[in-house]
Structures are given as C-alpha cells and as structure tokens.
Image (cartoon, rainbow, N blue to C red):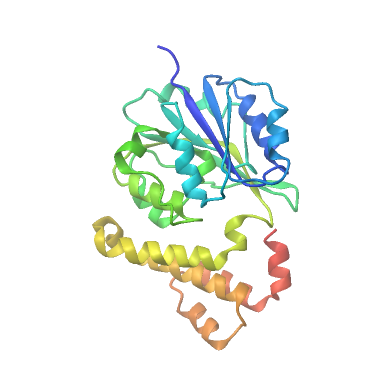
Amino acid sequence: MSNPKVSVIVNFHNGEKYLRQCLDSIIEQDFKDLEIILWDNNSNDDSSKIIKSYEDERIRYFFNKEKVSLYKARNQAIYNAKGELISFLDCDDWWEKNYLSSRKKFFFSEDFDYFYCNVKCFYQHRNKSKIYKNYKLPNGYIFDFLCKDYFLIISGVIFKKKLFNKYGFFNENYNIIGDYDFLMNISQFCKAHACELPLLNYRVHDQNFSKLNSKMFYDEYKNWFNKNISQNKNYLDNIKLFKIRLSYLEISYLILNKKKSYDVLKKIFCHKSFKEKIKLLILFLVPKEIIKYLKK
C-alpha cells in the first residue's frame, strides 16, 4: 500500500527571519510523499526570494494580493491542498526529521482521525528548550482532557482532510483561537493519536502574535465562550473550567495593558484556580517592564 500524501501548509506574512529553517525542516523529513504549500499572506519582505532559492518540485507557492485574516488564509490553503492528510507548520517553528515518519503506520488507521505530538518550547531569548508537557498524553476522545489543559499546538497536529469536509473549516472571524475552536469541536467526536516524542520545536519570542494581542485573545475567547456554552452540553458540563480560562485571560490582559488597580486585584483574589491566582498575583506585583522581559 502506497503512502498517503501529506499536504504541509506554511502560512506566513513577512516570515523571512525564520522561513528557511522552517522550510528546511520540511524538506529534510524522512517521510517524502508530501507537498509543501507556502501560503504568502501579502508579504513585502524577502520571503519570496528565499522560496525561489529552493529547487524542490514539491513546493507550491501562493501569494495573496490582499492580506486577509490568518484563518481565512489557512482555509484558502486547505482548499488548494491535494493530500489526504493536512498538517500545518507556522513559519517560526520547525520539525524534527521524523515528525511525519513517526506516525506513518497510523495514517491508514480507521481508529484515529488526527495526530499530535509533544513539543519542545524553544525560548529564543534564553536559547533554551523545555518539554511542553511532562505527563502521558491521551489517545482517543480527548475533549475532557483539553477542557482541563489545552495542550495542542497546531504546528504539531496532523489532520485527515475529510475532517474539514465533515465539520467545516476554520472560523475566519478569529485571528488567534481559530485552531482552538476547531480542535475543541472535533475532539468531541473524533479520535486522536498521541506521540510522546517532542517532535515539534515551537519558538517562543517577543513577536508571538498572541503575546502582542492579549486583548484580542481575551475578546475572541469571550466571544467563543458566549457563542458555545449555552448551545453545547459537553461545553456546559465543563463550564467551570472555561470560566476559569476566561477569567485568567481577562486578568492577564488587564495586568499587561491597564493601570494596576484595586478592581484588578479583586479579580485576582476571586479567581478560582489557586495556582493561577498565585501566578497572577506575582504578575500584578512585578513591574510591567520585568514581565515583558521575562515573556520573551
């Protein structure tokens, strides 16, 4: 039986700084039956020159004449994908050589619908890596696990393409939580296969979009919460966990972007997670300049 083709989608806007390392990690995969979709969301840097320096017939380069939302760009790339499997790799991340080959024997399995792995978080400012999760990752229906601790990073997830045809594509109104929204939905009905190996290198740096847009992160999650909780029993059963997450995002945003006040302090003491309460209290007491330095 021949290998299924994997469509590797790299969405980027002005990604020249990290694009070569990202692309090299795809080309050097042990698993070779893939296409590389480079979806340029209206870059005005030298990204296209970097891409043109490669002579690999598996590369398919697309250029958006108008910049669109991230998840609209992701959807556009999916529409053009020819593979039975869809994987994403953000241009500031990179894979280990056996990222795809490590799951090869499961690609044909009817028991699993999507695949994920553990991650090495690379803290660029400190030039150090740390394993993302130090517990056994769950297989199968992982919705309840994700409600407690959302441990998926899209650059480390491989989807069977049929999932998008069955459950729809990413919500294009989101700029940060589109993958969260999609994965929380399918995890209720679809089975995941976990690989314990940390095969994705996720770059943590001061230009991470979610870091720079904490208010957008909070607003999008609040929108997701209000839209889904009352309509879905599985979400409603986990409402306390979602409320804690919403509270944490709100307080984090307020600490980083607003004047520290009694009202913010009151929100911290009302927060339902003791561990997060301590962390937020420390953030509240530490000067913002130090917080921003430590978040790099």
Considering every residue shown, the one lying at the far bottom of the view is: 262
Which residue is drawn at the image coordinates 65% and 44% (left, top)?
Answer: 92
Above/below status of 294 relative to 49: below
The quarter holding residue 279 reads bottom right
The quarter holding residue 294 reads bottom right
Left or right of 253 in this view: 84? left
Closer to the camera in the image, 175 or 109? 175
Residue 213 seen: yes
Closer to the camera in the image, 201 or 216? 216
Which residue is drawn at the image coordinates 54% and 46% (left, top)?
Answer: 134
Q: Position of residue 226 (x, y in %)?
A: 34, 67
The quarter holding residue 65 reads top right
Above/below status of 288 relative to 241: below
Q: Position of residue 125 (x, y in %)?
A: 75, 53
Q: Position of residue 6 (x, y in %)?
A: 48, 26
Above/below status of 80 relative to 58: below
Considering every residue shown, the one lying at the far front of the view is: 65
Which residue is drawn at the image coordinates 52% and 50% (left, top)?
Answer: 70
